[in-house]
Image (spheres, rainbow, N blue to C red):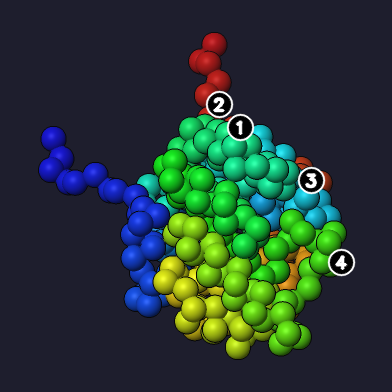
Amino acid sequence: MSSQAPIRRITAPQIRARKGGDPIVSLTSYPAHTAAIVDRYADFILVGDSLGMVMHGMDSTVGVPLDLMIMHGRAVVRGTKRALIVVDMPFGTYEESPEVAFRNAARIMKETACGAVKLEGGARMAETIRFLSERGIPVMAHIGLTPQAVNTMGGFKVQGRDEAAWAMHLDDARAVAEAGAFALVVEGVVEPLADKITAAVEIPTIGIGASKTCDGQILVLEDMLGLNPRVPKFVKIYGDLGPAIERAVAAYAEDVTARAFPGAEHIYKPSRD
Ligand code: KIV
């Protein structure tokens, strides 16, 4: 029998305790196979509702159904051992009331076995964040550019260009931290505002298109692998996999067309008679 201790997953309180410490590494993942690779490097993996746009060709995240998030959440939990898995609550599943949010968040936690949920919104979601956190559901908050609000924002727009709005974003950050969120995604805000938000709250900030002073960073995996045709400007491409996949698919098509595709001869042993 092996004497090795079982690998324990990173928990939401452990992420919370990283405020001001070593930067928190995180990425999104939607299927089990990429999640298994990301798991070796990331402190948490987000099953983001960006999957609607990145994997399912939607124009925004507004149409993502809860069942789809649960299906991908399950796959990512199955494919990983170490990272905290955070699953996004999709649009329409938490805004109505804390009770509705609890019911849907509890479904996500029970049916995926993830360790936390994420929801978008600042001060207006504080009551819901408190309600969930006090009832056993760790909540990651998300402020700044909140993609589920694309229709009221009038597009995916960088926030805080006008300094007059900074106080509102800072109030949002303080409200969700005070309500019990264990971490806060700060997306698409001008750098000096992201710096102020990080300094203003006692929970870790996770930047995306924000600032390097955030307590951690997150990227959409397909964006940094060059697999998303609509990559935001701030994303550094760490591996341009699109051309490599295209070369492999073209070579396969050529083999099939030329009847050079290996058949089953290597596994077929003709009988002696
Ligand atoms: O849905 C998502 O992938 C996200 C990240 C961009 C933070 O919310």
Say whether marks 1 and 3 touch (CB < 8 Å).
Answer: no
Disc 1 beta carbon < 8 A from ligand 1? no
User: Is residue 80 shown to the viewer in this render?
Assistant: yes
Q: Judge: label 2 CB < 8 Å from ligand 1.
A: no
Rounded to the nearest angstrom, the CA distance separating label 3 from label 2 is 49 Å
- Residue labelled 4 has its Cβ within 8 Å of some atom of ligand 1: no
Q: Are marks 2 and 1 in contact (CB under 8 Å)?
A: yes
Q: Quadrant of the C terminus?
A: top right
Seen at 36% across and 69% down, the residue is: 18
Relative height, residue 231 to residue 105 (above, below): below
Instruction: Give me the disc on residue 70.
Output: none
Q: Closer to us: mark 3 or mark 2? A: 3
Q: Earlier in the sequence, mark 3 or mark 4?
A: 3
Q: Residue at point 38% right, 72% down?
A: 19
| Viewer-side residue, 109 vs 181 | 181
Q: Position of residue 21 (x, y in %)?
A: 34, 76
Determine which residue is flagged by label 1. Answer: 264
Mark 4, residues whose alpha carbon is within 10 Å: few (<14), some, or many (≥20)? few
- For label 4, the SS is loop
Label number found at residue 63:
3
Alpha carbons under labels 3 and 4: distance apart: 17 Å
Q: Is residue 228 above or below residue 196?
A: above
Say which amino acid is labelled 4.
Answer: Gly
Q: Secondary structure at mark 1?
A: loop
Which amino acid type corresponds to the residue marked 3 in the rendered image? Gly
Residue topped by disc 2: 268
Circle 1 residues within 10 Å: few <14, some 14–19, many ≥20: few
Residue at which label 4 appears = 154
- Assess disc 2: are there few (<14), some (14-19) or many (≥20) residues with their C-alpha within 10 Å of its C-alpha: few
Q: Circle 3 sits in a helix, a strand or a loop, which is it? A: loop
Q: Earlier in the sequence, mark 4 or mark 2?
A: 4
Label 4 or label 2, whichever lies nearer to me, is 4
